[in-house]
Amino acid sequence: MMKTKRITWLAPLVMLLFTAGCPVDINEGEGGGDDGPSEEECPTAELATVRIFHGAGGTPVTRLPFVDPSTRNLTVVRPDLDPEDPPVVASLVAGRAATVQICGNKEVTLGARLLGAAKDRATLKITLTPDADPAKLDVGTTIILAGISDEDGENPASAANPLRFIVVPDTFSATAEAQIQVVHISRLTPTPIDVEVNPDNPGADITGLERYPTPTPAMPIPIAQTKGSPDNAAVAVPVAFLQGTSTKKSFSIARVPTGAKVLAIHYDNEVYDPTSPDPVPAPTARLFLTGDDPLLGRSANGGVTLQ
């Protein structure tokens, strides 16, 4: 409920458009796509533009003799094209997003596994609708990876919070008002939770937001109106997670561009390193902002992170 009304192979058919970067020292590498044979899986007119976000935590830190500790990227692959050596769609650092194009009008299978792992930890079968104009690179669907991204149960928390895909279609309205959609995948913030997203309307704008949502056409993730402002008269926008009168976590967006459609993903940054000789950082809840505005969705890391 809301106070306001309601967003044959990979090259070039799964095209990595914006790559992920390295957010922390223990990261293993940058995101990227695979080069495959030149055969096309589908015509260019049937491509669908998709954003993939890695919001899963708890990847075990790899410690090898004489090598700096590292965490493996989470890769999204196409096991339906080659079960033994599936092509890579995206390889992501936690808290980063990539934009890719995948064939629409047919069922495709996506798998998620840590870089170098032999088996998927989660799979998704999905049929995407092709873009009206694939050349515009207009994201029609965001696919979020949530839960715990380990390989084979090394992190005990993965039993209760397994790696999973969450599919969020763009259901923003074609209006001039700024809008925001919040997806809750943080294990540190309670569920259900209310969210304030509009400085003009103190209090909750979205109520009863559940962790790990399973949106459907009949019950999409809520979208609320927020405050857009120009660069020369910026207005800060709160994103506060409320339980009754208690604020469990809050963020402040310095400015939402006028008319922007913002996807805000509330996730956790977590280092899982039980063998570390030193204390590891405590998990922290963060907010990843992306969307149609170039300042958000087309930034170097696919979005902007608040903490």
Image (cartoon, rainbow, N blue to C red):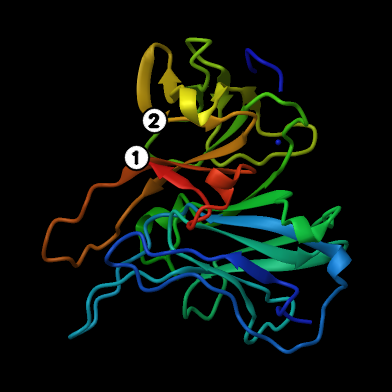
Quarter of the picture containing the N terminus is top right
Q: Are marks 1 and 2 in contact (CB under 8 Å)?
A: yes
**Amino acid at the residue labelled 2:** Phe
Q: Which mark is residue 307?
A: 1
Q: In percent of the image, x 71 and y 50: which residue is there?
A: 141
**Amino acid at the residue labelled 1:** Gln
Q: Is residue 81 left or right of residue 30?
A: right
> Which residue is disc 2 drawn over?
251
Q: In percent of the image, x 19 and y 56: which residue is there?
A: 280
Quarter of the picture containing the C terminus is top left
Where disc 2 sits, the SS reads strand
The answer to whether residue 234 is visible is: no
Badge 2 crowding class, 10 Å Cα cut-off, few under 14, some 14 to 19, many 20 or more, is some
Q: In percent of the image, x 72 and y 64: which residue is there?
A: 101
Using the image, determine if residue 21 lies above or below residue 283. Answer: below
Q: In the rendering, at what x and y percent does residue 7 appear?
A: 70, 36
